[in-house]
Image (spheres, rainbow, N blue to C red):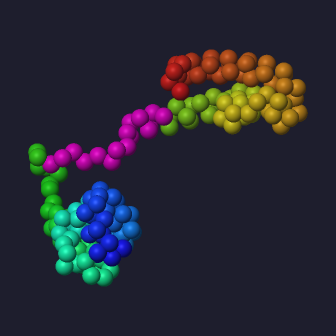
Amino acid sequence: MTGGEYLSLLERSPKLAHEKLFGEYYNYVRTIAFNRLRSTGTSEDVEECISDIFAQIFFTFCEKYSNGDMKGFIGTVAKRMSIDHYRRLSRKAGKTVSIDDEGAPEISSGVDLVGESENSELRRILIDSIKELGEPDSTILIQKYYYNRRSQQIGTLLSMNPSTVRMRCKRAAEKLRKVLELRGVKEGMI
């Protein structure tokens, strides 16, 4: 799209002109911003920079750019604004806050270590309890509840009648419930 085409479309429908310009040049602008900010910024920083670039283009484009292709103008704006964002992010990165400061935000990894540890322990207890049941009960329970297989499929795997598999599965589940109760694991914990 040339500058003249953009201006005539802008006069008819500003929204459509902005959408067309954004659609046509988004990848070009994103490449420029990403290449400049990839070492210091996050993906949110890159997207913020892209938004600022397009805002600048929409607000500053005037008739003096109406001759020829707009790519040069857009590239110049994108490079300059990406450099400005890079400088801003670099200055922010230089600021550090002591963990001992009362005003310092809590640092969190987002991982619930206590919950993960409890789940890991429950999984270990469950697997040990299933193994205690012996064969073929442990295989039947694992195939049924972990792999979500039907009695017919499990029967074929173990050379058993499907009705026998269902009966053994019911009895094994009851035995497992009792074993888990003895180990202090209540229903609903797993």
* 108 drawn magenta: yes
Q: Position of residue 97 (x, y in %)?
A: 14, 56
As for residue 152 lying within the magenta part, the answer is: no
User: Quick one: which residue is furthest to the left in this view?
Assistant: 102
Depth check: give the residue in front, 99 or 95: 95
Above or below, 186 relative to 122:
above
Q: Residue 85, percent across and down?
A: 21, 68
Q: Residue at x 81, y 25 (%)?
A: 165
**Which residues fall within the magenta stretch?**
104-119
User: Which of these two is toward me, 179 or 49?
Assistant: 49
Which quadrant of the rendered structure holds the N terminus?
Answer: bottom left
The residue that appears at 33% across and 66% down in the rendered structure is 21
Residue drawn at x 81%, y 34% as measured from the top left: 153
In the image, 89: left or right of 13?
Answer: left
Q: Is residue 49 above or below residue 177?
A: below
Q: Is residue 159 left or right of residue 53?
A: right
